[in-house]
Image (cartoon, rainbow, N blue to C red):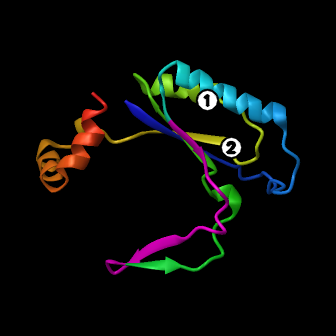
Amino acid sequence: MRFIITAQASADKEEPDAGGRLDEALLTAYMKFNEEMHKAGVLVASEGLNPAAPGARIAVSKGKRYIVDGPFAESKELVGGFYIIEVGSLEEAISWALRAPSGLGTDDVLEVRQLTGAGDVPPDVLDIIRAAAPTWSESVWQARK
């Protein structure tokens, strides 16, 4: 099973100081955690996300997409980064999340959610997906077996 662990600031957290000094020990702790998950064979991807200001928000109204002008949500409402891990259960995903370091100010709250796999989709819907996107569905779901 694949899970995504997203990180965001807690609601009561002050905005992190963008110009603040790098905490080498903290960065080392994060990288060692990534290395530990990689060596354990559970880490699929891990990335931080840049601030929202140079990004874009796209919404939908009456079936049409449009660009939403800023300002964007407060930083404490934004995802600051993520891990995608492949483990045997929700409990194992949670155990990894509980071991994650913290201290950047953008990762006080971790949310663990299972990614949708072929086994989560009804067979008739899976048939439509495979017919409409055969190479994509094969690459995504066959790699997870």
Q: Which labelled disc corresponds to residue 1?
A: none
- Mark 1 highlights which residue? 34
Front-lying residue, 72 or 48: 48
Q: Quadrant of the N terminus?
A: top left
Classify 59 as above or below 75: below
Front-lying residue, 76 or 39: 39
Residue 58 included in the magenta stretch of the image:
yes
Q: Residue at x 61, y 25 (%)?
A: 35
Q: In this rendering, which labeled residue sits more in front, label 2 or label 1?
A: 1
Q: Describe the element under mark 2 as helix, strand or loop.
A: loop
Real-space CA distance between mark 2 and mark 1, rounded to the nearest whole angstrom: 15 Å
Where are the magenta residues, as a range? 45-64
Percent across and percent down for residue 13 are 78, 51
Q: Residue at x 49, y 78 (%)?
A: 67
Amino acid type of the residue that numbered disc 2 sits on in the rendered structure: Asp
Q: Which labelled disc corresponds to residue 107?
A: 2
Percent across and percent down for residue 77 are 64, 58
The answer to whether residue 95 is visible is no
The answer to whether residue 72 is visible is yes
Residue 9 shown left or right of residue 45 in the figure: right
Classify 92 as above or below 81: above
Residue 39 shown left or right of residue 21 in the figure: left
Q: Residue at x 60, y 21 (%)?
A: 36
Q: Residue at x 58, y 44 (%)?
A: 47
Percent across and percent down for residue 93 are 50, 27
Residue 143 shown left or right of residue 97 in the figure: left
Amino acid type of the residue that numbered disc 1 sits on in the rendered structure: Asn
Which of the two labelled residues, at mark 2 and mark 1, occupies the earlier sequence position? Answer: 1
